[in-house]
Structure formats: C-alpha cells, structure tokens
C-alpha cells in the first residue's frame, strides 16, 4: 500500500500561556512507496511519533491529508485504517499468554470479517512462526525476554494482515546486541510480508541499516528523503551531514571561494601522508581493532576535536605530533555559514 502525505501539519497549543503553538509536523508533503521499509529519523522531539500518530489516526491533523493508496483516510478512524502498531514498551497484556495476546485483535472482528476459532488459531500460529515465537505460545509476557516480548508485539500487529505497519522506536528497550538482532529480524519480516512499514528511530545507525528510504527530520520539518547511502554521501545541509555517521563528521570554519564557510570532512575522508596539503595535530591514537581512530586538533576546528578513522594497517608509524593529510573530495562538503545549506 502506497502512502501519500499531503501538506500534512500538526500544531499543538503551547503549554506556556501566550506561547506560540508547537508545530510538531510542518507541511509534510511526500509519498511512501508500496512495500518498502521507511526509516523516520531525527532527534527526540522532532515530530516522529506525531507523524506516526497522524498516519495511524490516533491524532487528527491540523491541516492536510493522508492517503492510503488512492483513498483519503484523513477522517477514517484508526480501527478502520488497516494498520498494525508496535511501540517501544511492547504494551502486551500481562495477564494473557503469548497466544492470547496474538489472538486479541482477531477476537473483536465483526460481521463478514468474523473468524471461527480454528481460523483465528491458524492465523495466530502462522504469525508466531513468522516472528519465531511459536515455541513460547503458552508463556506469559513476564516469562519472556525483552526481545521475545517485542516479537510478540510485532506478531500481534501483523495478525490482521495490516496494509501498513507502524513501529515507534521498537528497539529502544533492548540491549545493544539484541537491538541489532531484532532490527535484522524486522527487516526479514518486512521483506517476507512485503508490508509497507514505517520505522521510527532517533538512532541513525538503526535507520540506515534496515531502511529502503530514510526521511531525516528536524523540528517538525523534513530535511531530506533518500536511500540511506545517497543521503550519507550527499547531505543537503549541515544538520543532515552531522546527524548521519559515527563518529560524526568533522567541522572546520574555513574560507571557501573567498568567503567563510563550514568545511566538513567525514572521519574516513582523511588520507594521512607526509606530502599532504593540510595540517593537523595528532593528540591521541586510539586502537579500535579493524580501524584506528586518530584524535586530532586544528585551530579552525568547530567542536572539541577532529577524528580521522583509518584502517589499522595504515596506522603503523603514525605518532602523536604534527601530521599532514589530503581530503577525499567525495567525503568533503562545504556549507553556507548562515543558511547551513550545502554549497559544494
Ligand atoms: P519525537 O517522537 O520525534 O520525539 P514527538 O512527535 O513526540 O517527537 O513530539 C514533537 C513535538 O510536539 C515536541 O515538541 C513535543 O513536545 C510536542 N508534542 C507532542 N505531543 C504533544 C501533545 N499532546 N501536546 C503538546 N505538545 C506535544
Ligand atoms: Mg517519539
């Protein structure tokens, strides 16, 4: 199912008396293609959950429209939109077993949609197998790990075969290893089912690794939409350049075409060589195993320091003190000092 957001805006009244409205979602105007996994990415408070709530119908927009395929669903109640929802805190019913939790959405179906007990059981078992919890059907949520609980929540969201699956920071309660495992699972499940999925996260690594497309947001405004690698390689503005990438992109205030500008270089964009064009002072060499991180300083650096990531085998013989480098042009961007838009 293709989704279209048309001039979609949500304003909340300010809690402070006389304060301006908070525009949580500001004039969103884009299309989410059918069958893809979209990562909605941005810092806390940028309007990700509000966007999801508008799509699900839990919130009504201040203005604008939402289409599922060709159907305008702006005024359709959530239960009739054909969506599956998964939240950070799983929201399972603690007194019900895994099986009963998964069956729950099927038990309220009315009229033509009503299912027999056998049909319901078959559907529940099918999704339990899909998310690989079919061994745990008799357990209560308290007897499951966080990762298993989130799988149950995903199964429950999928059991009615939604047209759109909406996941709001689904991995935030899991530890680092499980987060990576579960995000790969979500990707697999999305590919197997082909359900158009919107995945909300503040974690750029998470969004980049599993999304077909990412939508980068800031203060309720879409900054850039594209394939993760394209956005990383071609950030439209300084915010996007700084939000994607670990360690973050390095920033210098420098002159460009006779004018002061921000020059930004990705950590992997430094070639350390004695006949390099530019200078750095290498303060600390950090061994990371596969790579080596060079922590450097420079008098026009914006922020605390400069981080260069180089392959470990190239780090031999590089010692603290003055060093020289060349910048890989594909890893270097220039941004206007005032607008912070990309100029080169
Ligand atoms: P995110 O999910 O990206 O962290 P949210 O969508 O939750 O961001 O919030 C976006 C902005 O809207 C924030 O400034 C938040 O304080 C505000 N906001 C969200 N929900 C409400 C609400 N019900 N009433 C007032 N302000 C809200
Ligand atoms: Mg949120």
Image: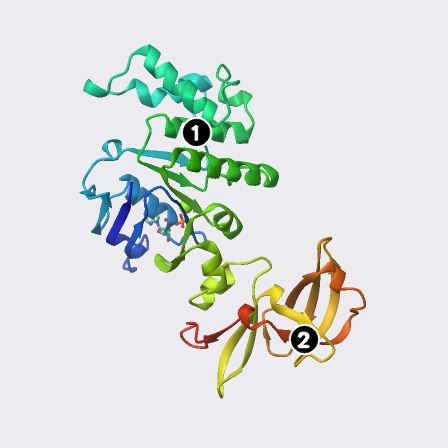
Circle on res. 153? 1
Q: How far from the left and from the top, in percent, is residue 3?
A: 28, 45
Query: Where is 337 relative to 65, above or below?
Result: below
Q: How far from the left and from the top, in percent, is residue 28?
A: 29, 55
Residue occupying the point 23% across, 21% down: 113
Mark 2 lies on a secondary structure that is strand
Res. 223 image quadrant = bottom left
Instruction: From the viewer's perspective, tell me whether residue 222 is left or right of residue 285.
Output: left
Query: Where is 184 relative to 51, above or below?
Result: above
Residue occupying the point 41% across, 17% down: 100
Q: How would you rate the neighbour count of disc 2 (Cα within 10 Å): few for under 14, some for 14-19, many for 20 or more?
A: some
The answer to whether one can see residue 73 in this image is yes
Do the residues under discs 2 and 1 have CB atoms within 8 angstroms?
no
Q: How far from the left and from the top, in percent, is residue 316?
A: 79, 64
Res. 226 image quadrant = bottom left
Res. 112 image quadrant = top left
Q: How far from the left and from the top, in percent, is residue 110?
A: 22, 19
Q: Which residue is mark 2?
A: 325
Query: Gap in Å between the C-alphas at discs 2 and 1?
Result: 50 Å
Which quarter shows the N terminus? top left
Q: Nearer the viewer, residue 48 or 137?
A: 137
Ligand 2 is within 8 Å of the C-beta of the residue at disc 1: no
The answer to whether one can see residue 96 in this image is no
Mark 1 lies on a secondary structure that is helix
How many numbered dots are placed on residues in this image?
2
Query: Where is 135 relative to 76, above or below?
Result: above
Pick whichever of labels 2 and 1 is earlier in the sequence. 1
Instruction: From the viewer's perspective, tell me whether residue 34 is left or right of residue 313.
Output: left
| Furthest residue in direction bottom, as rendered | 258
Circle on res. 107? none
Residue occupying the point 73% across, 53% down: 289
């Amino acid at each position: 199912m293709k989704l279209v957001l048309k001039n979609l805006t949500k304003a909340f009244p300010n809690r402070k008396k006389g304060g301006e409205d908070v525009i949580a979602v500001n004039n969103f105007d884009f299309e989410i293609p059918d069958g893809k996994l979209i990562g909605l990415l941005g810092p806390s408070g940028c309007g990700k959950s509000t966007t999801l709530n508008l799509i699900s119908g839990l919130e009504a927009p201040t203005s604008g429209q939402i289409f599922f395929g060709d159907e305008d669903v702006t005024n359709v109640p959530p239960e009739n939109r054909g969506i599956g929802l998964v939240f950070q805190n799983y929201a399972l019913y603690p007194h019900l077993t895994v099986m009963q939790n998964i069956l729950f959405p099927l038990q309220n179906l009315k009229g033509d949609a009503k299912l027999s007990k056998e049909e319901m059981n078959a559907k529940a078992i099918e999704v339990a197998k899909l998310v690989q919890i079919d061994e745990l059907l008799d357990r209560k949520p308290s007897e499951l790990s966080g990762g298993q609980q989130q799988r149950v929540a995903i199964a429950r969201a999928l059991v009615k075969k939604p047209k759109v699956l909406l996941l709001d920071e689904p991995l935030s309660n899991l530890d680092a290893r499980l987060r990576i495992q579960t995000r790969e699972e979500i990707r697999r499940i999305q590919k197997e089912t082909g359900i158009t999925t919107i995945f909300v996260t503040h974690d750029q690594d998470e969004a980049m690794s599993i999304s077909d497309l990412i939508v980068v947001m800031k203060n309720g405004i879409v900054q850039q939409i594209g394939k993760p690698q394209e956005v990383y390689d071609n950030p439209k503005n300084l915010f996007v350049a700084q939000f994607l990438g670990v360690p973050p992109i390095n920033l210098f205030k420098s002159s460009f075409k006779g004018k002061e500008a921000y020059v930004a270089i990705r950590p992997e964009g430094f070639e350390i060589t004695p006949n390099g064009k530019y200078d750095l002072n290498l303060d600390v060499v950090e061994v990371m195993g596969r790579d080596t991180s060079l922590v450097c300083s420079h008098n026009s650096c914006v922020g605390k320091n400069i981080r260069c990531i180089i392959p470990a085998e190239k780090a031999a013989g590089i010692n603290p003190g003055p060093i020289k480098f060349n910048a890989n042009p594909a890893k270097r961007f220039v941004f206007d000092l005032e607008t912070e838009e990309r100029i080169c």
